[in-house]
Image (cartoon, grey):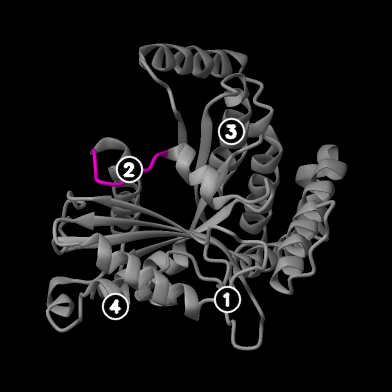
Amino acid sequence: FFESYGSKDRELIAEIQEKLRKEAEKCSCLEGFIITRSVRGYNASGLGSRLLELLSEYDKTVKMDFRLYPDHCNPSLDPEDAFNSALATYYALNANTDFSICLDSGALSRICSQNLDIKSPSFDDVCDLSAYLLESLTLPMRQKGLINGGLKDMANNLVPFPRLNHLIPALAPILCQNKLKSVKQDTTTLTSSLFSSQSQLIDCGDLKNQPYKHLACYMSYQGKDFDLAEIDDSVDKLGKKLSFADFSPAKFKVCLNEQSPQSTKKIFNNKNSILGLINSTKISNVFASLKSKADTFVKSDDFQTKYSNNDSAARESIEDLGYLIEDYNAYSNDNLDSDF
């Protein structure tokens, strides 16, 4: 991680900065940047974190980190992969990233297998699903709608506090064509299904005996058949069922576009679909799982061999991940600290 983050290849960093400037200069009204990366390996976690810091000169723009975590629920996950992921999370916070869309490879594989009937999901299948999510995410920015939403709208409505900026993405419906035929697709059903783990692209673990609260939700309705009155009614019903933190005044942000994402070979999109971005304290389970495995790596001989020169920085990063977990847990119980 640190070798990629503090890249000795100054020419590479200079080349990246120059390309960023050229692309930014082409924009008549630059709104922000979307960084897409997997954080289990060295380059995407380390160099990706450095790239986020390079964007600091564009201080009036929104920075979104589209971040793919490894399957943290897998007992055989390499502790070093969890370590890289923990460092990437820490450095993204320090780079003043406005918000992060968090996915994990285990949840993507599960959706491919269970929802899309792909018997043995491949790397391409997982990438296809990630790309479909990104297309749905950017659709309101690329197409005019009755109610539009851009990066600034997402940041303003979904992030109540700078550190609590890790969002759970969800898609409804996210099913193969055969399964779509037998599923209700009215507005209320689709809206509610966003909050089912089967529709969410990151696994937050077993929540049966764990209190959690929602902080804010963004829902982008994409399709010609959605009616604004039905959307309002569905959102109102949902708001009465979900548990929100007491401080949440505006619980939902809604967008509405007539266009819908394009179908792919494996993902059949009906004419109506919804993208959900959920800021919930339950995502702390992901960080707790990663921290546990990262702690194991820090205690290993392998860590001492590879990271002896960065020991204090590494330990500080893992420790801060623990503080982030505590921040989320405090809001799970609504034990609000006015100084937070």
Residue 263 falls in image quadrant:
bottom left
The answer to which of marks 1 and 3 sits earlier in the sequence is: 3
Cα separation, mark 2 vs mark 3, equals 33 Å
Cα separation, mark 1 vs mark 4, equals 18 Å
Q: Could you tell me which residue is drawn at 41 percent across and 11 percent down?
A: 25
Q: Could you tell me which residue is drawn at 68 percent across and 49 percent down?
A: 161
Residue farthest to the front, as pictured: 229
Q: Could you tell me which residue is drawn at 60 percent across and 75 percent down?
A: 75
Q: Amino acid at mark 1?
A: Ser
Q: Is residue 120 visible?
A: no
- Asked whether 147 falls inside the magenta stretch, the response is yes
Question: Marks 1 and 3: CB-CB under 8 Å?
Answer: no
SS of the residue under disc 1: loop
In the image, residue 163 lies at what x, y percent? 69, 49
Magenta range: 144-150
Q: Which mark is residue 243?
A: 1
Residue underneath mark 2: 148
Cα separation, mark 1 vs mark 2, equals 26 Å
The answer to which of marks 2 and 4 sits earlier in the sequence is: 2
Residue nearest the viewer, comparing 276 with 291: 276
SS of the residue under disc 2: loop
Residue underneath mark 4: 189
SS of the residue under disc 4: helix
Residue nearest the viewer, comparing 201 with 50: 201
Residue underneath mark 3: 47
Q: Residues within 10 Å of mark 2 (few under 14, many from 20)?
A: some
Q: Residues within 10 Å of mark 3 (few under 14, many from 20)?
A: many
